Each structure stands twice: as C-alpha cells, then as structure tokens.
Image (tube, helix red, strand yellow):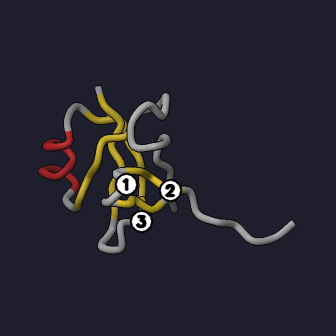
Amino acid sequence: MIYAAQIDENKVVLRVIAATTLTWCVKNLGGEWLQTWKDGSQRGKYAGPGDTYDEDANEFIAPVVDGP
C-alpha cells in the first residue's frame, strides 16, 4: 500500500489516498499522481490538499496562510 497525491495542472494537490500503486490511481481515477510518504521522509513532507508540488526541488510545499 502506498499514499498517492493527485495534482492538478498547476501542481496543486487535490486529494491524497491510500492505493495499491500509482498506476492503479491513473487507470481508475485519471489525472496525475505522485507518491507521498506519511513520515515525510521523501519530497519534503506528507502531501495534503492545497499543497503545491515543486518539480525542481521535488518537494511538496505547504500553502502560505495569511492572518493571525
């Protein structure tokens, strides 16, 4: 079992699911998928909806939230 993050055309994470493979995700759900790791050991952090994938750094980046 892996954790897979679906990203849109702007590289923003839409959702994260547990799946058997990335191929399964593409075949059954469509779109672009990347693997993410619960312990954050790869790609900077565990991906979450709203994060952005930076291809150059190969990392998921959390959104910046303004406010108190």
- 57 sits left or right of 67 in the view: left
Residue type at numbered disc 1: Ala
Image marks 2 and 3: residues in contact by CB distance under 8 Å: no
x and y, in percent, of residue 23 in the image: 13, 43
- For residue 61, the mark is 2
Classed neighbour count for the residue bearing mark 1: other residues with Cα under 10 Å, few (<14), some (14–19), many (≥20): few
Classed neighbour count for the residue bearing mark 3: other residues with Cα under 10 Å, few (<14), some (14–19), many (≥20): many
Q: Quadrant of the C terminus?
A: bottom right
Q: CA distance from mark 1 to mark 3?
A: 15 Å
x and y, in percent, of residue 14 in the image: 42, 61
Looking at the rendered structure, the secondary structure element under dot 1 is loop
Looking at the rendered structure, the secondary structure element under dot 2 is strand
Label 3: which residue?
12
x and y, in percent, of residue 24 in the image: 16, 42
- For residue 57, the mark is 1
Residue type at numbered disc 3: Val
Q: Quadrant of the N terminus?
A: top left
